[in-house]
Amino acid sequence: MNARTPLIVGNWKMHRDHLEAIQLLQRLAYHLTEEDTAEQETVVCPPFTALRSLQTLIQSDRMAVALGAQDCHPDPEGAHTGDISVPMLARLDVRYVVVGHSERRLHHGEDDALIARKARAALAGGLRPIVCVGEGETARESGQAEEVVLAQVRGSLVDVSPAEAADLVIAYEPVWAIGTGRTATPADAQDMAAAIRGALAERYDEATAAGIRILYGGSVKPANIRSLMTLDDVDGVLVGGASLSAEDFALIVGHRRGV
Ligand code: 13P
């Protein structure tokens, strides 16, 4: 056991309009017991258009679920058509923000330097960034997975101070495991999480690295959640597809049931 609070995050990606989002969260709340959400954090990251509706629902029903956003701009305001700033998210009680998801690295050309700016903006604005890293299939097959991932970790944390680092979350999501039904083996997930923690200890110090939560993402399902949550260096999960089913996500959040 370590002192890190487990963190279960659902990334809804570009799914569910605000009315459907309300339904999904209500169904999720119906399936969750108080025990499921105790001593761990449960977060959902809907599209921006649903944040306000879900904020109201969470508040009025006192749900033990927090809100996350899927992206942010590094600047607090400005002429950035189509972008959303950290202060805007903070006003909606958003506590977490995903930065550097592989889909944004790939389809929006985001690089480590931009992701580091977003992570710093999130921290400065009181949000916790979930910084995503992960190797592609070619890097995995050529034995370069660790090198690629650790370079992303270092590059995505440039100028993030040791004082701020405690609020960081790192999500290891191998690109070949996202939406494919292929999961990294528990041993591979543990090895990479340990390597990431090692890089964080080098960058900061052992104590800081020991406090930073590292998530695994990529085809997380009710069937594999328990084997992932028992790993020493994996402190939670970032769930895509399965978080769109209230029943499945409740089973993932409630992974300790019947253990
Ligand atoms: P899947 O769980 O659908 O593989 O998606 C993972 C992911 O990208 C979460 O951010």
Image (cartoon, helix red, strand yellow):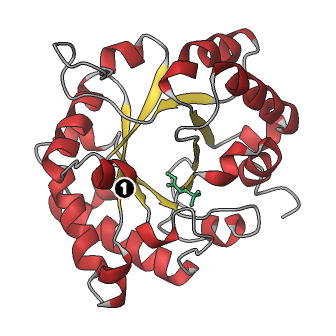
Query: Residue 141, percent across and down?
Result: 36, 89
Q: Answer with the quarter of the image where residue 77 lies.
A: top left
Q: In the image, is 151 to the left or to the right of 208?
A: left
Q: Answer with the quarter of the image where residue 152 lies.
A: bottom left
Q: How many marks?
A: 1
Up-down: is 26 above or below 236? above
Answer yes or no: is residue 174 visible.
no
Query: Residue 208, percent across and down?
Result: 29, 52
Q: Quadrant of ligand 1?
A: bottom right
Label 1: few (<14), some (14–19) or many (≥20) C-alpha neighbours in 10 Å = many
**Three-letter code, disc 1:** Ser
Residue at horizontal 73 percent and vertical 29 percent from the top? 25
Q: In the image, is 126 to the left or to the right of 251?
A: left
Q: Answer with the quarter of the image where residue 108 lies.
A: top left
Up-down: is 242 above or below 74? below
Which quarter of the image is occupied by the C terminus? bottom right
What residue is pinned by disc 1?
A: 102
Badge 1 element: helix
Identify which residue, 172 or 138, lies in the foreground: 138
Residue at horizontal 68 percent and vertical 64 percent from the top? 225
Up-down: is 109 above or below 192? above
Which quarter of the image is occupied by the N terminus? bottom right
Answer yes or no: is residue 259 visible.
yes
Query: Residue 101, percent across and down?
Result: 37, 50
Residue at horizontal 19 percent and vertical 49 percent from the top? 157
Question: For disc 1, does the CB lie below 8 Å from ligand 1?
Answer: yes
Up-down: is 196 above or below 119? below
Query: Residue 250, percent across and down?
Result: 78, 46
Residue at horizontal 83 percent and vertical 32 percent from the top? 27
Q: In the image, is 171 to the left or to the right of 29?
A: left
